[in-house]
Amino acid sequence: MTVGFNFLEAPELPAPQVSDAQAEEILATHYGLRARATSLGSQQDKNFVVTVDGEIVGVLKIANPAFNATEIEAQDLAAEKIAEAEPLLRMAVPLPNIAGQKCTALTGLVDGTAYVRLLRFLPGGTLLDSGYLSPTVVAGLGEVAGRVSRALEGFRHPGLDRVLQWDLRYGTAVVAELISYVTDPLHRARVDATATEAWSRIAPLVDELPRQAVHLDLTDANVVVARRADSSPEPDGVIDFGDLTDSWAVSELAITASSVLGHPGSEPISILPAVRAFHAIRPLTTAEVDALWPLLVLRTVVLIVSGAQQASLDPDNPYLTAQSGGEWRMFEQATSVPIDVMTEVIRADLGLAARPDPVAGSLIDVDPTSVVTLDLATTSDVYDSAFENDGSLEAGVEDGLARAAAQDGARLVVTQYGQPRLSRTPKLSQESPNVVATGISIWPSAPTRLAAPWDGEVIADDDLTLRGVDFELTLSGVHAVASGRVNAGDPLADAPADAWVEVGVRPVGAPAAPLLTRSELAPGWLALTRDPRPLLGLPAVAVPDAGDLLSRRDASFAPVQEFYYRKPPQIERGKRHYLMSTAGRTYLDMVNNVTVLGHAHPRIADTAARQLRKLNTNSRFNYAAVVEFSERLAGMLPDPLDTVFLVNSGSEASDLAIRLATAATGRRDVVAVREAYHGWTYGTDAVSTSTADNPNALATRPDWVHTVESPNSFRGKYRGNEAVKYAGEAVQQISQLVADGRPPAAFICESVYGNAGGMALPDGYLQQVYAAVRAAGGLAISDEVQVGYGRLGEWFWGFMQQNAVPDIVAVAKSMGNGYPLGAVITSRAVADGFRTQGYFFSSTGGSPLSCAIGMTVLDVLRDERLQENAARVGAHLKARLQALQHKHPIIGTVHGIGLYLGVEMVRDAETLEPAPEETSAICDRMLELGVVIQPTGDHVNILKTKPPLCIDLEAADFYVDTLDRVLTEGW
Ligand SMILES: Cc1ncc(COP(=O)(O)O)c(C=O)c1O
């Protein structure tokens, strides 16, 4: 006999009807408040926001009269207990009325006694309208649930003794009671079958599930958030204890996690951070882990049937109609993956996966030495020449490889179980693709008879299934030669020659696996299938595990050499403007400015291989390549820049440029632009003041470095038309240096402002400053390391955009398409001036290999018209990004030209307050959706958009569409 409310006896629970005016009267009479009450949406109770002089002071809650005083007392005590035990959590505890009571009992307001409380208001809002929930926010939800669960363990009260429709112990009874409210018969049947299936997983576990007091509604609607600096939510508070009861502890987490699935962009695996966070605070038992996903599924069914019932009781309640779309989304997501698969995914994620034994039996009697195993992983060499011109893998690449192996004498070609196959990866996709094999494919080179590996029943339709006692074998692409019962060794099927046969093995009762699954679900499907290779007499292949590559990296590779992303994919291959991970995902590469021609360009690979087979030595020897390459470089620059030095990097090139200037002028002072980066060497670091690269940059300059204002026309000292004033100021500073007796050797500057995301310098800037430094006897250095070499589309060199000619040009990055290559090009007179500092030699700068690669890069740039492509695709990209700016106010502006663009993110269009945290979160979400992009700039708030120059319109659109999606759904 339950003491409190019993839903199963009183399933209709419309919210009490109380007006705002009545609520205001209660506040005045019982709380001494002259306040405004504004009705809030709620399913069972009646709630009002209470404001005094425009400030929210609390929430007035009139409990549904179906709940009694004992139940309400339990709720108030529970809130107080959690507040005490978990000081990090904010709690909606009750505030006393004028009689000092937490609860005001009123008669005459509703039928029976109305229990009224004024609850503490927790500012910050909930996650209900938050759009996409990032893994960090989802983890935050799980953490709140874990803390509440931990705090409520051991809390006992008679008011917990109730039967609530949200208590999943009664899930099937609730569904039975309410399912008739779901009017669409197809929906009703689906919902019913789902509840039955979920319960079939829960029922065997119920005796093992620990019970305790649970809040039971810690969802996106009842967890309150604090706002971080970037206004992103941080779950830290709890409201609404109306569903407090005694139930399975794990229900708390199941209900919290279910609410994640209502948000755009979420899918079953999105709940994992919440599960991990909960488990870290309140460890789950094995039975709880196994019950979690079925309970979550059941929860989504309960929400649907309850929503249908409430809508029919209270058809005008807009709160209910607004909710039902989200509830269906939750249900669709919860049922998008078989229950057992998600349970295995959760187990694996918590490190609790079982290691199944391999299968035994013989399907084909074949000499293992005549079997060839195909490696279709991202790292495999089989793909080296298998790409089409557009960067996609040739259709039928797997067939071609099998045919070739068979021609070489293989009796059987076999693929690998559990291997992510790059051969199945689409070029561009916001979804992670189905690439991980849950079985194997075999390709016999001659017709082959297959035998039953165990006793069992043959079921033949499109596929052939042999169901034994423990395992089920599925073959597709064969002709059955048996039916009914067979014994191990009996003929089973014939496989044709030169075609794939798919072989799958799973324990009897496991769901039928798709041939390929996503890497995120692979731990689930692989736990519910077996490697069929032992049936061919071959050893099972272990799915390779690189271990924790990042901690190994940090142990051996200086961690100050940071990596992109907190959880970066392991990238082991590239093609054109695509990067491929070992999980078989292809990403659009929007950051690799160095690989101008695109990744793994075959002409570069050929050049390197041919040259390495012939000669690689240094420029003290006499060979043609160094001459030809120097001639070509010099030929690409205006007079008098006719003399070339060859080095290995941008840092070396800029460093050498500075040394040439100091040698030629006999001076030591250098003028540089603030917020720029020129390299890591001692000299280039001295002239670099980008705080993104070195936070102490400005304060630690040596005395020979003099900086001028960064000519930022968007957010700098002078903006828009005023930006022309930067040049005048720089000229004045140079004159002052002369006046101080420290005339500069050089002025060094990027010809397009790279650190600001590719911003053009103000008109006339370089002409004026170059003139001033020359008038003072110094030299003008143009750092073209990032912006030169065709990226700007309209101009090959950045200084051309300014109609200025420098005295020294430093270039690198693009020159070698990723092979280390740099150059300094200057006049003969300046080059000769270096004699005063000795001679110049670089062991590998200008080597035959460097020069051969450098010339091939120039050939490909020309032959593939990549500068033209930069202009064409860049213009399209910029126009589309600018259009996006009108839609999303966070985009402050779009800098740049050609394929050097910067999307600058701001919190406020007026103040231009930078949005660095938002930019970082946007980059993380872009990665999830298949785009590699990173922030830049001193405020780290600019999406530095600088892909390989071979990028096409399709990929440019993919980038913009993905950014649009992220900015629309949230990050
Ligand atoms: C403008 C500029 N100059 C010089 C360098 C240094 O080039 P590297 O990294 O090849 O040494 C960089 C590198 O980012 C750069 O952006």
Image: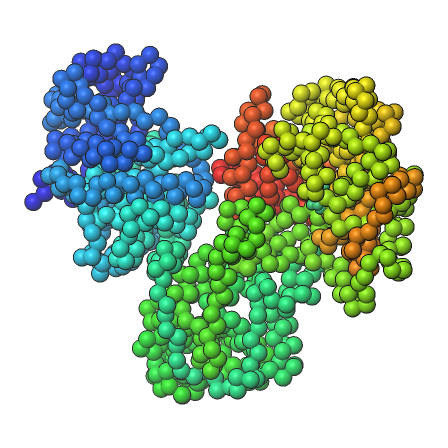
Quarter location, residue 512: bottom left
Would residue 195 be visible to someone looking at this image?
no
Quarter of the figure with the N terminus: top left
Residue at 82% over, 58% down: 618
* Foreground pick, 241 / 809: 809
Residue 806 is situated, as x and y percent measured from the top left of the image, at 85, 34
Q: Is residue 542 left or right of residue 395?
A: left
Residue at 63% over, 49% down: 589
Q: Is residue 158 left or right of residue 284?
A: left
Residue at 55% over, 48% down: 559
Residue 96 is situated, as x and y percent measured from the top left of the image, at 18, 21
Quick check: which quadrant has ligand 1?
Answer: top right
Residue 461 is situated, as x and y percent measured from the top left of the image, at 43, 74
Quarter location, residue 316: top left
Residue 630 is situated, as x and y percent measured from the top left of the image, at 87, 50
* Foreground pick, 773 / 925: 773
Measured along the vertical axis of the image, is residue 684 above or below residue 623?
above
Q: Is residue 201 left or right of residue 854?
A: left
